[in-house]
Amino acid sequence: MSETTTSMNTDFLTRLGVQGTSLGACWGEWVETSEGRELVSVSPTDESEIGRVKMASKDDYGHVMTKAREAFETWRMVPAPQRGEVVRLLAHEFRRHKEDLGALIAWEMGKIRSEGEGEVQEIIDIADFAVGLSRQLYGLTMHSERPGHRMYEQWHPLGVVGVITAFNFPGAVWAWNAMIAAVCGDVILWKPSSKTPLTAVAIQNICNRVMKEAGCPGVFNLVIGAGREVGETLINDRRIPLVSATGSCHMGRRIGEIVAKRLGRSLLELGGNNAIIVTEDADLDMALSGIVFGAVGTAGQRCTSTRRIFLHRSIAASFTDRLKKAYASISIGNPLDDSVLMGPLVDEGAVKDYEDALETIRTQGGEILYGGKRVEGPGFFVEPTLVKADPDMPITKDETFAPILYIFEFDDVDEAIRMQNDVDQGLSSAIFTRDLLAAETFLSHRGSDCGIANVNIGTSGAEIGGAFGGEKDTGGGREAGSDSWKIYMRRQTCTINWTKEVQLAQGVEFDVS
């Protein structure tokens, strides 16, 4: 494990405006919170205090929400290409702060620096995508059955979109929603994870500068507060037509139920129990790289992290040996050290979940092949862990947000696909193979049941150009690219009669003369 130190250079905190105590409510201008309770952000690397945030109350939420609704009245009337130009300016500002913001994400969340900067690059990429999208919010034209009539559909902004994000991608997931929603004409009310509040404050500072200069404050809004107060208020608020939430399946079920009761929309991105199948003819070097990054990257705290692998019986023993050697080479430590490949888990609770899972694995008959222990010293570091597992072990059907990888064996591809699909979650999946038949079977109607299915790449690291999301208990939501923008707008079908008489559809006659 590399050495960690609290004397490291943290000038990036000052440049991002998150040193000391920050405010937790903003509508383009920071709001002095009414209660003043403080949320302490602690680095998972050495357990040192990074900064504090004054938490927003229900009253603060109400104030920000009022300002957001006022901003929507103006923003929705700005032509979409002009909204895109504002987002382009945001992308430019995020480029300027990529290194600093990436370092903050690494220091506050625990992912390594290159992953932190990669997350900022996702913010930039989705902003660039949204700029082009601002000229492509297309509707259809349709032929009417009535002479002298024209039919078409158009898309209108929804209103204030509520965005609830998790700690593991404290910036990118916000951007997937916020950049697209903004060019659609919506305004955003963001409740970030309480585990990564300073990243949210830094992002809001960047947005404030750009939006103030553009003359449109209030498009991007922030409330940092307790879930039982601010979170519950947000999801129950009828003024929010769409709630986009990323987190656990348990959280998603609650949000989905509450929002559905008020007939609102939910966009849910929930758990993933992602798997990779490796056939006997696969390029094993490629498979090794894809599996190790998928399982160890972000210390196994990605929703797309690889948690299960299915190895053809003929290669299982030799490939498992290669995995053990690869795991032994993983450097663990300070995520800002460029030589480190795996940082810490996010907090003590995550370490406990890891340790509890290992105890359950032993109880259910799993064999720990590598790792399985907490790393001694400050911070929330654990060893990446390999487990030889049986498909009937109940714990393998659940998602543990930690670097634990279950290894199974199979005899034919159909068997592997059945085992892969035999979990409640359905986010990401992959197969490594040179066999065209195996690849196409995996991608067919009887193949992977996940929202993402890859061939010869891993489960982790989706591009923003495609729709991101999963099926079953993953929630069914779609974010980022393709036509995901439609969830942030309302569809309207329009008919124009340019004759001098009213004609009813389906040949109905109704004479009132």
Image (cartoon, rainbow, N blue to C red):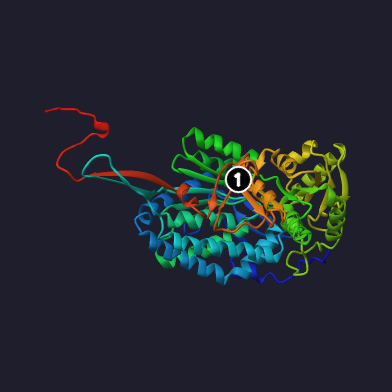
Quadrant including the C terminus: top left
Picture layout, residue 133 above or below residue 150: below
If the image is split into quadrants, where does the N terminus sit? bottom right
Q: Is residue 371 left or right of residue 242?
A: right
Residue that mark 1 sits on: 470
Q: Nearer the viewer, residue 69 or 464?
A: 464
Percent of width and height locating residue 457: 68, 57
Q: Residue at x 35, y 44 (%)?
A: 492
x then y, percent, for residue 327: 83, 58
Please state which amino acid type lies under the numbered disc 1.
Gly
Q: Is residue 5 above or below residue 446?
A: below
Q: Residues within 10 Å of mark 1 (few under 14, many from 20)?
A: many
Q: Position of residue 512 (x, y in %)?
A: 14, 27
At mark 1, the secondary structure is: loop
Residue 281 is left or right of residue 186, and the answer is right
State the residue in front, 144 or 181: 144
The answer to whether 100 is drawn above or below residue 142 in the figure is below
